[in-house]
């Protein structure tokens, strides 16, 4: 699921590959997009009247108002990312080793191609792209998949974190190993990543790097083996890290643990600050509940059960302050989150 930048439209996708666009806050369906066989990734590009979807090897650009297809591209392999709300970066792969990241405008016009040069050849590409808040640099954690499950899981030499300058197309740096980028500082000058050396290790490592050069500034051990979500808070002074059922709050950039609490069962993929940073909203894809915790102590203010099925998406509108949640069967709830209990208004 995704909200348009102006908060006027909600787009949801289901297992059948259909995308439904709903007007907010009325809840009236305004368009249905049919272009995929499986549940696609979706993202608004531009002001909210253009939307892109990607699954089963196809990337499609749509008119969000009319529901008409504008353009489509084949051989997409991975999850795209919308950059600064205006352009879209998507990974492509043609076996055995022809991988690339391609930058498109809101109409689906190709602006630039970044070649993904790795020594390994494979049957597939695992690529997680990202971009800094200003849209100046692109990043990607990549792994060419050989088809050998044990080799793909335990071989570190085929994994790499790469950076590109979006204006010049140059690659200023890359880092070898199973290190995936998680969150940027508010000014975009630095980012944190997470790395797990091996599956027997009870905890992973959080790394703090410069965006422009990739230089390592600091690193510290996490309380968790995996990080499912990271979010900067308090203008970049704190870092919230969600793992298997718990959230840890770290001082930044010192890496001092400020609070650590069990919040929800399962890995929490959704973290969003609320009420000028006084609260944190959290949700998990393995449960039906949404938690609201107080900052900085992470005390639970409310746990809301608004769905009968597990969550697929949770997003806060930056303009109006409401929260939209969607479960795996496509049921959506529009929430007004009061400080005490959270109240479902639609």
Image: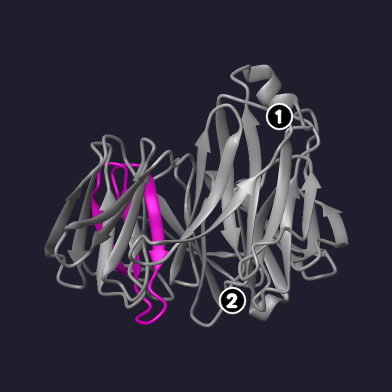
Q: Nearer the viewer, residue 174 or 117?
A: 117
Q: Nearer the viewer, residue 188 or 122?
A: 122
| Residue position for label 2 | 134
* Number of marks: 2
Residue found at x 74% / y 25%: 154
**Which label belongs to residue 120?**
1
Say what secondary structure mark 2 lies in. loop
Quarter occupied by the N terminus = bottom left
Up-down relation of residue 251 to residue 116 (above or below): below
Say what secondary structure mark 1 lies in. loop
Q: x%, y% of residue 299?
A: 59, 65
User: Dividing the picture into quarters, in which one does residue 96 lie?
Assistant: top right
Up-down relation of residue 306 to residue 158 (above or below): below
Q: Nearer the viewer, residue 76 or 133?
A: 76
Magenta-drawn segment: 307-335
* Residue 268 colored in magenta in the image: no
Quarter occupied by the C terminus = bottom left
Give the CA distance from mark 2 to mark 1. Answer: 32 Å
* Residue 318 colored in magenta in the image: yes
Q: Residues within 10 Å of mark 2 (few under 14, many from 20)?
A: few
- Which of discs 2 and 1 lies nearer the camera? The answer is 1
Ranked by sequence position, the earlier of labels 2 and 1 is: 1
Q: In this view, does 214 lie to the left or right of 48?
A: right
Q: Is residue 70 visible?
A: yes
Residue found at x 23% / y 69%: 345
User: Dividing the picture into quarters, in which one does residue 236 lie?
Assistant: bottom right
> How has the structure been colored for display?
one colour
Up-down relation of residue 332 to residue 100 (above or below): below
Q: In this view, does 171 lie to the left or right of 340?
A: right
């Amino acid at each position: 699921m995704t909200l348009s930048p102006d908060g006027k439209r909600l787009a949801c996708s289901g297992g059948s590959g259909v995308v439904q666009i709903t007007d907010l806050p009325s809840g009236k369906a305004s368009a249905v997009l049919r272009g995929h066989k499986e549940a696609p990734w979706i993202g608004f590009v531009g002001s909210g009247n253009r939307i892109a979807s990607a699954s089963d090897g196809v990337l499609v650009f749509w008119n969000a108002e009319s529901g008409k297809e504008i353009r489509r591209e084949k051989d997409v392999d991975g999850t795209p990312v919308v950059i600064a709300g205006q352009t879209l970066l998507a990974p492509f792969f043609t076996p055995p080793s022809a991988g690339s990241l391609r930058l498109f405008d809101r109409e689906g016009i190709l602006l630039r191609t970044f070649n993904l040069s790795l020594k390994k050849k494979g049957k597939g590409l695992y690529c997680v792209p990202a971009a800094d808040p200003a849209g100046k640099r692109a990043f990607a954690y990549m792994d060419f998949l050989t088809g050998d499950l044990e080799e793909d899981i335990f071989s570190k030499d085929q994994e790499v974190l790469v950076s590109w300058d979006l204006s010049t197309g140059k690659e200023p740096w890359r880092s070898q190993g199973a290190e995936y980028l998680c969150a940027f500082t508010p000014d975009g000058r630095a980012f944190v990543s997470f790395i797990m050396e091996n599956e027997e290790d009870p905890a992973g490592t959080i790394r703090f790097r410069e965006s422009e050069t990739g230089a390592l500034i600091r690193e510290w051990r996490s309380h968790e083996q995996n990080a499912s979500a990271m979010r900067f808070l308090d203008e970049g002074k704190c870092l919230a890290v969600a793992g298997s059922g718990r959230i840890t709050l770290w001082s930044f950039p010192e890496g001092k643990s400020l609070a650590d609490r069990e919040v929800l069962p399962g890995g929490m993929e959704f973290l969003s600050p609320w009420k000028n940073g006084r609260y944190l909203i959290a949700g998990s894809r393995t449960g039906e509940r949404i938690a609201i915790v107080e900052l900085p102590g992470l005390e639970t203010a409310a746990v809301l059960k608004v769905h009968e099925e597990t969550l697929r998406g949770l997003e806060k509108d930056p303009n109006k302050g409401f929260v939209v949640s969607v479960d795996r069967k496509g049921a959506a709830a529009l929430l007004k989150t009061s400080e005490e209990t959270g109240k479902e208004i639609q």
